[in-house]
Image: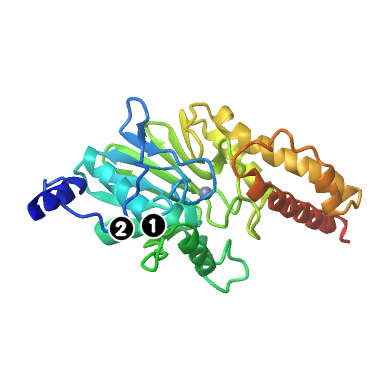
Amino acid sequence: MKRLLAAAWLAACPVSSTGAQTAPPYPAITIPLKLDQVPGKPIWYSTGSPGIPGKDNEGNTSNAGFVVTSDGVVVFDALGTPSHGWALLQEIRRRTDQKIRYVVASHYHADHIYGLQAFRDHTDALIVAQERSGEYKDNDGIADEKASQRLDQRRNALYPWIDGNTRVVPPDITFRERMTVALGDRRLTLFFAGPAHSSSDMMMMVEPDGVLFAGDIVQNGRIPFMNSDDVSTTQWLEALGEVEKLDPKVVIPGHGRALTEASQAIAFTRDYIRYLRGTMAAAVQDWTDFDVAYGQADWSKYRDFPAFASNNRGNAYRIFLELEQSQFKAVKP
Ligand SMILES: [Zn+2]
């Protein structure tokens, strides 16, 4: 009987590329990652659930992907729990034995970075981020969100996948404006695109494939989170313009499904930002109180999208403040 149980337990454990049985080092997820391949390219990605992180989606709400070059693997984002980072690592191992060289973090927000822990603890990969990711810590007035407060919140919301062992892993390498990695038959260019959605937004273009990993600059079919000191919708609209100029063949967004045309990929995020700005600009100009303006606005176009209830009001308020500030600057002598 004991032997039977042991056999069942072993059968439930993943098999490593060397064929040895290894127990997962993090609490198991019950909703498996589903990977898609960019047609004809050595590039894979997973698409997270559109809602906000919670027990129903086990914290898998963002996208991540990887590029297999002839000289190693580059991973873009690491998902929202160490368990998901581990699952992504197993998906990579299922497809290649190549060394994982870099894990690029699109920006330091909880839904994209807790999976870094799995790569830090189980690979030699170097973690790369834009230098302002260093602001992701505590007691920093300009931080996107307070790192330890967010971790506490997730330990409640996402237990057991986020627990006392979960930690924020800092990058090994940072860059300011641009970093190019030539690896085997691929060239990867990392661009700073923020501060737009966060202080440290960046995007990664993969050539010669023309595939752009856009991070949270591009989000599809979901109300993005904008209620942070670091959000600049002015810069965000510029970054979306950059995406259009790069003219990628495929855009893999930070949230939502991958799209093939740049103009189509950016449309949802751009339309939403423009709509919020238009609505709030009128209120700022007329000296209308925010609550009144918010109550009077027509939200029917966005009300049914995931994360509307949790994000829209805060987003509108943040944009109200941003526009109020720029108006104040404009009239200052
Ligand atoms: Zn995100």
Of residues 182 and 88, which is closer to you in this image? 88
Q: Secondary structure at mark 1?
A: loop
Of residues 24 and 141, which is closer to you in this image? 24
Task: Give the tally of numbered discs.
Answer: 2
Q: Residues within 10 Å of mark 1 (few under 14, many from 20)?
A: many
Dividing the image into 4 quarters, which one contains the C terminus?
A: bottom right
Query: What residue appears at the point 49 percent right and 58 percent down from the top-left corner?
Result: 157
List the residue tagged with mark 2. Answer: 26
Is residue 161 something one can see in this rendering? yes
Is residue 70 something one can see in this rendering? no
Contact (Cβ within 8 Å) of mark 2 with mark 1: yes
Q: Residues within 10 Å of mark 2 (few under 14, many from 20)?
A: many
Q: Position of residue 128 (x, y in %)?
A: 39, 56
In this picture, residue 277 sits left or right of residue 32:
right
Q: Position of residue 212 (x, y in %)?
A: 46, 37
Q: Secondary structure at mark 2?
A: loop
Of residues 76 and 181, which is closer to you in this image? 76
Q: Position of residue 19 (x, y in %)?
A: 11, 46
Above or below residue 107? Residue 41 is above
> Residue pushed farthest bottom?
139
Above or below residue 149? Residue 53 is above
List the residue tagged with mark 1. Answer: 161
